[in-house]
Amino acid sequence: MKTAWVRVDPWDKKLVTTALEGGAAAVMVPEGYHQKVKELGRITTIAPDGDLKPEREVVFYEVKSHEDEKEILRLAHSATVVVRTTDWTIIPLENLVAQADNIFTEVSNSEQARNALTVLERGVAGILIKTDDPAELKKTLAIVREQGEQVRLSTARIVAVRQAGLGDRACVDTCSQMEQGQGMLVGNSSGGLFLVHAESVENPYVAPRPFRVNAGPVHAYIRVPGGKTRYLSELVAGDSVLCVDHEGRAQQAIVGRMKIERRPLLLVTAETDAGEVTTLVQNAETIRLTTPNGEPRSVVALEKGSEVLVAIESAGRHFGHKVEETIWEK
């Protein structure tokens, strides 16, 4: 996920408030204003007396030549580097983004932010926004929130659905409202995660709960930000999960509550071009997978040949991180 910092120098309480409300991760303020920021809200400060110290944890560097790029890459081994360019050109950023993962750049408006966050498709890790216009700051922060991860989804064809007995299943209640076509990626193996639809669908049995995904049993993997996975049983309030739509656009959501209850389960087996994938879900009409066109399909209505969306990758995780080793999951 992309990160936004805001430079507030000279001090401006309204800009700090706008940064907090817009989801900025940090504000850069003059020395002596660290405590004033903390009085307004919990946020990281960048200042000589702040949480992050300039020229120590955060280094600022202006690119003027190819030699400067080499020095920035060296510094990036031990600090976050905020890059400035004399004429705001994309080329130095392309060179740096291709070789380092913790490059930030300074921007003054939403257009520059969009360019920086999409350079070479992957974009810089974050931006430092420098503007004295609260409206422009708000607009630029919105651009950052839009730049979520992109997940490659594939179509899987249902092979079989059968009753599996009772098990402890987990509902993930988030602090976000999800829409049709959105849900979370869950599965028995990290190599094949099903897009389980949010409970955002009107039905005659219960009111919609668009903040919730009835994800599956406690052992299952769930995709979280940064290309990682967690076990459903590990999640607690305050953790981050990934909400994904049927086109693979992903956004971070905060877990507000986990509900684990004993419920009857179904084993869903599907076939992809890469092989067979499975997941377990609660045996209930209100639990849905997601079709390639974004439609929710109830698990009790799945038939052989039904098409659903999955995320496929080579299986193998160590503490949630993808690893290249020989692992069989079945």
Image: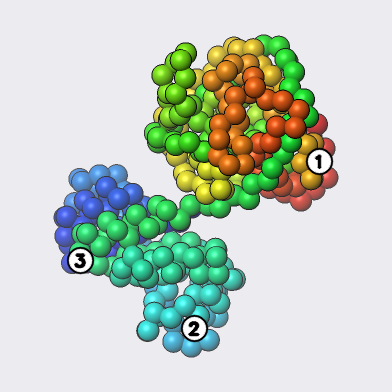
> Disc 2 and disc 3: Cα gap in Å?
29 Å
Q: Residue 188, position in %: x, y?
A: 70, 31
Location of residue 16 (image quadrant): bottom left
Lower sequence index among marks 2 and 3: 2
Q: Residue 97, position in %: x, y?
A: 54, 70
What crowding class fits label 3: few (fewer than 14 Cα within 10 Å), some (14-19), or many (20 or more)? Answer: some
Q: Label 2 belongs to which residue?
A: 68
Nearer to us of marks 1 and 2 is: 1
User: As displayed, is residue 298 above or below residue 241?
Assistant: above
Q: Residue 213, position in %: x, y?
A: 51, 28
Q: Are marks 1 and 3 in contact (CB under 8 Å)?
A: no
Residue at image position (60%, 12%) is 263
> Disc 1 and disc 2: Cα gap in Å?
48 Å
Q: Label 1 belongs to which residue?
A: 275
Residue at image position (36%, 68%) is 111
Callout 2 secondary element = helix
Callout 3 secondary element = loop
Location of residue 279 (image quadrant): top right
Q: Label 3 belongs to which residue?
A: 132
> Disc 1 and disc 3: Cα gap in Å?
54 Å
Lower sequence index among marks 1 and 3: 3
Lower sequence index among marks 1 and 2: 2
Nearer to us of marks 1 and 3 is: 1
Q: Nearer the viewer, residue 269 or 325?
A: 269
Label 1 is placed on what type of residue?
Answer: Gly
Q: Is residue 247 left or right of residue 325?
A: left
Location of residue 187 (image quadrant): top right
